[in-house]
Amino acid sequence: MIIAVDGPTASGKGTISKELAKHFTLPFLDTGLLYRAVGWTLRDQGGDADNVADALAACQFDSALLDNPALRSEVIGGLASRVSVHPELRRALDKRQKDFAYQPAGAVLDGRDIGTVIAPDADVKLFVTASSEARAVRRFEEMKRRGELVNFDDILADILKRDDRDQNRAAAPLKPAEDADLLDTTNLTIGDAIQQAIALVNAKISRRENNGPA
């Protein structure tokens, strides 16, 4: 079984995806980390995130880098968002994601274009979203817990900027797949969001078993 989970930054899709993988005993890949690893490597190489050649040169990173918690910093996240607009870079990372998605054991993948590009025939597709203000609050609180000096207005502005880049890029823009189930987490606790996600997956499995593909 392939479960595709898409959505904007700080919507809760990462946590939800990990819990779905645990619940259904499936391998998990946070595809956003691939782009963050490119952003990290590009920064180390002194490259320009808006230059496609520099972004492609940063694709040859060691897989061990994906375990580095520093990839989740706001700075690296911003670089990841910028490099992700390059169609050439997306194509370079597509095979890695598709190989993971279509492994015999099945998989859960979270990202921006899993249900639309990477695994368009996924068994289950979820689009996790929340208001920009709610997402900014979550990111603000998360960064404060890490001891970072942050400004809420700056975080909200960055989220809006990322949303604009993700939704309006020419290659694989962020949007729900036509057959995706929408999960709005704006007013949900993370526990409630996880339970609703599990319920949506179970409902899709049940429909397929009773009626065939739906």
Image (tube, rainbow, N blue to C red):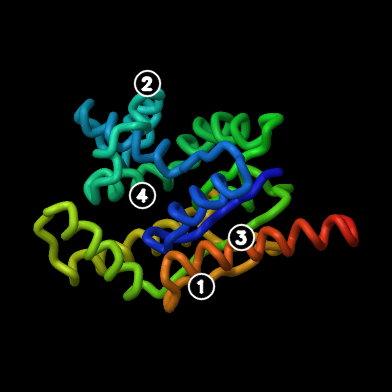
Q: Secondary structure at mark 3?
A: helix
Q: Secondary structure at mark 2?
A: loop
Q: In the rendered view, would you say 131 is above or below 191?
A: below
Which amino acid type is marked by label 1? Asp
Q: Secondary structure at mark 1?
A: strand
Q: In the rendered view, would you say 196 is above or below 171?
A: below
Residue matched to label 1:
184
Which amino acid type is marked by label 4? Ser
Lower sequence index among marks 1 and 2: 2
Q: Work out which residue is located at the far right of the displayed protein and give it.
A: 211
Q: Quadrant of the N terminus?
A: top right
Residue placed most toward the observer, 102 or 178: 102
Lower sequence index among marks 4 and 3: 4
Lower sequence index among marks 1 and 3: 1
User: Do tag 2 and tag 3 residues touch (Cβ < 8 Å)?
Assistant: no
Which amino acid type is marked by label 2? Asp
Residue matched to label 2:
62
| Residue 187 horizontal side relative to residue 214, left or right | left
Query: Of discs 1 and 3, which sits in the foreground?
Result: 3
Residue matched to label 3:
198
Which amino acid type is marked by label 3? Ile
Q: Secondary structure at mark 4?
A: helix
Lower sequence index among marks 1 and 4: 4
Q: Which disc number belongs to residue 81?
A: 4
Q: CA distance from mark 2 to mark 3?
A: 33 Å
Lower sequence index among marks 2 and 3: 2
Lower sequence index among marks 2 and 4: 2
Q: Work out which residue is located at the far bottom of the displayed protein and give it.
A: 187
The residue drawn where x is 43% and y is 65% is 190
The residue drawn where x is 39% and y is 58% is 9
User: Do tag 4 and tag 3 residues touch (Cβ < 8 Å)?
Assistant: no
User: Do tag 1 and tag 2 residues touch (Cβ < 8 Å)?
Assistant: no
